Amino acid sequence: MSNESRSKIMSSIRAVSKLESMVTHELWKKGFRFRRNVKGMVGTPDIAIKKYKIVIFIDSCFWHLCPIHGRMPKSNIDFWKKKLERNQERDKEHTQYYLHKGWHILRIWEHEIRKEFDITIEKIATFIEETRAVEASHKLKRP
């Protein structure tokens, strides 16, 4: 692939992916209310429900170097290695940040959505429902 072709492909990548839109559309249909790509929050979570301290990240197999599907580009290896490894470090930092603040965090891989869409939607829905229940019980215990 030429550098021009690769550059054109990379520039076409948007902040909100089609997969993310499909996931959020299904969750909205199920009655979940949330905010997408909340810029004021650390790491700009793909889905956030502040009331219940929930953040959900949908990680692309390429950009987050999925252990199953992540592939290092064959050209400009030093740049990509540094870039993708930094993305992984940042993911860990964001995860630790939210856990330290008492938030509930879920990370979903792109391949989970592509391979088992309905199962992944149920996984996310269950995570949200269980977290709501936990947060509701915490509020009842507080004076």
Image: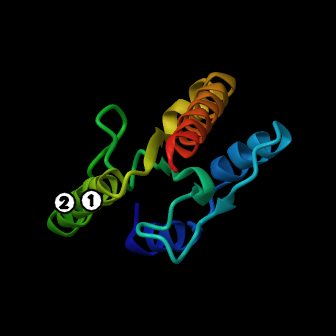
Pointer 1 local density, CA inside 10 Å: few below 14, some 14–19, many at least 20: some
Q: Is residue 20 above or below residue 76?
A: above
Name the quadrant of the N terminus.
bottom left
Q: Residue at x 27, y 54 (%)?
A: 96
Q: Assign a secondary structure to mark 1.
A: helix
Q: CA distance from mark 2 to mark 1?
A: 5 Å
Residue 38 is labelled as none
**Residue 128 locus on image (x, y percent):** 61, 37
Q: Are marks 2 and 1 in contact (CB under 8 Å)?
A: yes
Q: Assign a secondary structure to mark 2.
A: helix
Q: Is residue 54 above or below residue 6?
A: above
Residue 131 occupies quadrant: top right
**Residue 30 locus on image (x, y percent):** 81, 36
Q: Residue at x 61, y 27 (%)?
A: 126
Disc 2 designates what residue?
Answer: 81
Who is closer to the viewer here, 143 or 34?
143
**Residue 62 locus on image (x, y percent):** 39, 50
Disc 1 designates what residue?
Answer: 84
Query: Which residue is outermost to the left?
Result: 78
Amino acid at dot 1: Leu
**Colouring of the image:** rainbow
Horizontal side, residue 59 vs residue 20: left or right: left
**Residue 34 locus on image (x, y percent):** 70, 55
